[in-house]
Image: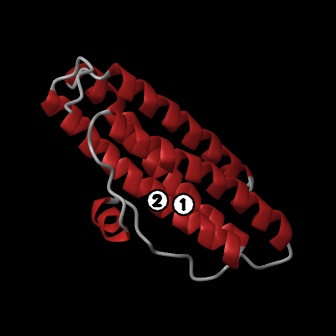
């Protein structure tokens, strides 16, 4: 059955395509954060191991929310590693060492990249695609990434 929520089908398709890229970025960032959790070394191991766990758990929830938003628009969410890697704007590049500082800088860069892309799409989705719900959703997601970036950035000062 078609989704009838007051948004043109071509617009829900365009929003779902934007959200699919967001989903891929979230998944790659989740994987990189999980890697940091597993592989961080150094005198601050336990503290950072726990910190990265908190962050990847938060990202796990965000991944689910993005996928469910795509489904609520009547489209299917990408759900394979191959699709995520073809859609993501992030790189799988990992730090050359397993220090907490190296992981934090890399993850911070990815969060900031996601924030910028979310910010670029918020008004487009609201004004051009007439989907205030998805625009609001993206604003909330951006705020979550801003807070996670702040936490990462605070470890570097």
Q: Residue furthest front?
A: 1
Quadrant in the rendering for residue 92:
bottom left
In the rendered image, which residue does mark 2 sit on?
27
Q: Is residue 37 left or right of residue 90?
A: right
What percent of the width, then of the height, locates residue 96? 57, 82
- The residue shown at (37%, 27%) is 135
Work out which quarter of the rendered image holds the N terminus and state it. Answer: top left
In the rendered image, which residue does mark 1 sit on?
30
Q: Which mark is residue 42?
A: none
SS at mark 2 in the image: helix
Residue 117: tell me if it is visible.
yes
- The residue shown at (86%, 76%) is 43
SS at mark 1 in the image: helix
What percent of the width, then of the height, locates residue 15? 26, 36
- Closer to the camera in the image, 13 or 4: 4
What percent of the width, then of the height, locates residue 17? 25, 45
- The answer to whether 106 is drawn above or below residue 38 in the figure is above
What percent of the width, then of the height, locates residue 80? 35, 66
Labels 1 & 2 near each other (Cβ < 8 A): yes
- The residue shown at (24%, 28%) is 3
């Amino acid at each position: 059955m078609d989704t009838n929520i007051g948004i043109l089908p071509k617009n829900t398709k365009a929003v779902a395509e934007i959200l699919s890229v967001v989903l891929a970025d979230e998944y790659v960032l989740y994987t990189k954060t999980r890697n940091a959790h597993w592989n961080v070394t150094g005198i601050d191991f336990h503290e950072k191991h726990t910190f990265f766990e908190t962050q990847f758990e938060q990202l796990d929830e965000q991944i689910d929310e993005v996928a469910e938003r795509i489904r609520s628009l009547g489209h299917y969410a990408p759900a394979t590693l191959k699709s995520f890697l073809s859609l993501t704007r992030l790189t799988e590049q990992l730090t050359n060492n397993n220090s907490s500082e190296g992981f934090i800088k890399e993850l911070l860069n990815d969060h900031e990249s996601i924030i910028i892309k979310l910010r670029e799409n918020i008004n487009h989705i609201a004004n051009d695609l007439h989907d205030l719900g998805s625009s609001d959703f993206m604003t909330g997601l951006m705020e979550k990434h801003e807070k996670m970036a702040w936490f990462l950035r605070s470890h570097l000062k």
